Image (cartoon, rainbow, N blue to C red):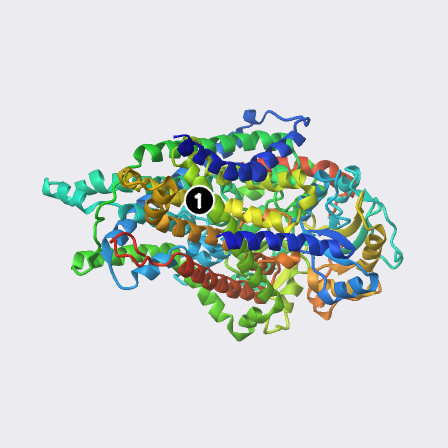
Amino acid sequence: MLRTRLTPAALALLPLAFLGLMAVGPVLRLFAEGAGQPSANLWADDYLRWRLLWSVLQAAASCLAALLAGLPVAWVLARFDFPGRALVLRLLMLPFVMPPLVAGIGVLALVGPHGLTGVDLQDTPWLLLYGNLFYNLPLVVRAALDGFAQVPQSRLAAARTLGAGPWRAFWRVELPTARPWILPALCLVFLYCFSGFGIALLLGGQRYATVEVEIYSLVAYELNLADAALLAYATMTISALTALAYALAERRLAQPLRFEPVARTRAASLWSRLAVAAALGLLFFCGGAPLLAVLGRALLAGRAGWVVLLEPDTVAALWNTTRFTLMALGAVAVLGVAHALAARRSLLMRALGFLPFVVSSVCVAFGLLLLYPAYTASLGLLVASYAFLAYPFVTKNLLSAFDAVPAHLAEAARTLGASPARTFWRVSWPLAREGFARGMAFAAATAVGEFAVTLFLSRPEWTTLTTLIYQHLGRPGSANLDAAMVLAAGLMVLALAAFLVIDRPARATRGGEHA
Amino acid sequence: MKLSCRTFLALALAGLSLNALSAELRVITHSSFAVSKSLIADFERQNGVKVSFIKAGDAGEMLNKLILTRAQPVADVAFGLDNALVARAVEAGVVEPYTPSIDRDIRQQLPGGVVSVDYGYVTLNYDKAWFESRKLPLPRTLTDLTRPAYKDLLVVENPATSSPGLAFLAATVKALGEEGAWKFWSALRANGVKVAKGWSEAYYTDFSKNGGARPLVVSYATSPAAEVFYDKKKPAESPTGNLFLPGGVFRQVEGVALVKGGAEREAARKFVDFLRSEAVQKDLPTQMWMYPVRESVTPDPVFRHAEKPGFDNTPDERTLAAKSRAWVARWTRVVLK
């Protein structure tokens, strides 16, 4: 008894220490620095209140849009088999690695003033929606797909036998089963959009900016730490409540049901073919087309553009991206597994799993500088920052997977004399392995695409592909734009290779989610 | 898993120990700093010191990082303090004044013992093809920008997150006075000015020369030259031009300074001198797209596509330090609220 209680607590120490050193300590240190400063009464300021409200509203709207578009797509992908399905599921993660500026250029190449489609959506709300779906739709589809794959065949069959139509069966059986997978994804979408360094804001202009932009400018430009602290506390409270609400909901909803999952059927009927075509069409339109536009621009750059790949700077950046991702993944695996194990029965640990998305990145970056001046621009701190931003994905996916492991399996193993460690290794882990792989793939995507790390101190010799792209886009001239597009194409290939290696199809034929 | 963790630690330690081997000069810079690697290598060889560059984001961000870490400086030399930041840097006590060995033959100076290295102009660029195809005459004054003929044609950077954005705002305030400037910006807002987060976003997603719909953008007077330089077809004329509107030109002077309390003083001073050497002054125009401060150094011939304005509307360093934060706060309310 003592042992089973002790183990999660001991496991929690590692992620808690890491979060304390990387987030809580730095942020508190930064705000302590500003404690003496005079502070204006921010809440009397209409503008800031409006900004805060707008941040919440647009994040909620993004969740809704991603959910409405994502659920049908995920359902179709979960129920039907078609050639190339496995590849589509991996390509699905590509938008995630694209730097927002490149994605924005891709979107405009399609629906901008000189766009290929001839439709100009610039400065319309549709462009905001499009940009939002580019990043968020894949996230929701991927999660909901995993959820729908958990629906037991017997339950669905029972519902149908008892007279439920497909629609009713969806609402009463399939959706409730998938909910524990969908909710964390929505929570992520909310947190991402709430802090909002996204493409939507890039395309919409600064009038649509979230409150995080205010915090950035208060800290980085004005060094007005007192006001920044007030704002940051407010946003972090909202984010933390979101994370907590999710944790509560997830634990209540978790229903381990792993019998025979619903088998996918081949898309043979006209109806199912149309459904698959519509789902793929929507995915392609939202995620694939802007990426293809970037690829197309890269191809148009011609030979003179492609020589950028042979430049020593590019080779060095490629190597940096690869090694930083690998180093971060090492730390991510350890932290993610420890956190997920510790959080299985702890609501607080579940919510803390989202801490890296809850704290303001710019506050963390400046706080780290204050707290560890001797280690600024050190490789250790850089890799730790990558791990910090990436490991919640492993925790999140692993937790969802653990929740789906029926308790009676572990109990049976224990009754048959297996030790807790053996039970975990032989029963729980094999069932959760796919969740782990999926989480690692998302973590790799985050590390390869790293957006927020640019806030931390860096060295030119640590230039990664993403930072090199931004360097080119920091100068005028068509050759720079060409170079950026070619490098972005390279980034896609590298990321796709990483997903193919990490998120391999399982060999087992359990009928679960193999892709 | 274990293996990668061990590799990670080993690599991290290797990274730390390498730095401890030879004397190291830490130079903090903004993210657009660039000097040819061969010149840096020459400097390292001649002075027996390893130069480590630390990129700290935008210039304003870099200064605040220096101010926050003043008790334990993270660098010995800082490059990128400009006339908008220099007075604040001096006031905050992060600068150790220095007079470089080369101090004659210099066009633009900075106060407070900060050593000027290069200078340039923030101004409007326009898309030549766009204006030609629509037979629209170019605006001639700032007020023209608020007229219906020029509705929805301008994109500016947010001065709260971008230095060229702040520079352009400062120029309008200098020329129009504070109240006049807010009236102008309010009219500009009514006329559909778009605000982008930074220069890259404005130039590559909103400027009509690239992906956007707006033929007027706040950029640099050297950008048209860079357009020619970075074009594989090497056109005879730049696709973009400078629009020097009265009240819309800001002169930016960038400098380098010794960081107070930093180490390696001898090497640090030599590095400051090095940035004023003929070799670096000749190198920097096509690296950072700024003019060299040495009068005797002529920049690359491509700079003929980047004429200098005959005037500028630059507030003095003290005013910039004292007022710019209040200007940004007010601007945010007038334009974004």
Quadrant (top left, top right, bottom left, bottom right) of the C terminus of chain A: bottom left
Asked which quadrant contains residue A480, the reply is bottom right
Q: Is A467 drawn above or below residue A20 in the view shown?
A: below
Element on which disc 1 rests: helix
Answer above or below: position of B262 versus A101: above
State the residue lying farthest toward the front: A417
Q: How many marks?
A: 1
Q: Is residue B53 left or right of residue A428?
A: right
- Residue A204 visible to the viewer: no
Between A398 and A201, the one nearer to me in the picture: A398
B163 to the left or right of B131: right
Q: Which residue is mark 1?
A: A337
Q: Is residue B292 left or right of residue A507?
A: right
Residue B229 placement: quadrant: bottom right
Does B334 appear above or below B168?
above
**Considering depth in this image, is B331 or A183 the residue closer to the camera?**
A183
- Residue type indicated by callout 1: Val
Position of B114 with respect to B218 (left or right) is right
Q: Position of residue B192 (x, y in %)?
A: 52, 46
Residue B87 image position (x, y, % from top left): 78, 41
Circle 1: is it few (<14), some (14-19), or many (20+) Cα within 10 Å?
many
What is the quadrant of the N terminus of chain A in the image? top left
Question: In front: A265, or A485?
Answer: A265
Question: In the rendered image, is residue A420 in sight?
Answer: yes
Residue A77 location (% of width, % of height): 27, 54
Q: What chain is tagged by disc 1?
A: A
Name the residue located 35 percent from the left edge and 35 percent from the top edge: A250
Residue B262: % across, % down: 79, 46
Q: Nearer the viewer, residue B275 or B120?
A: B275
Q: Quadrant of residue A483?
A: bottom right
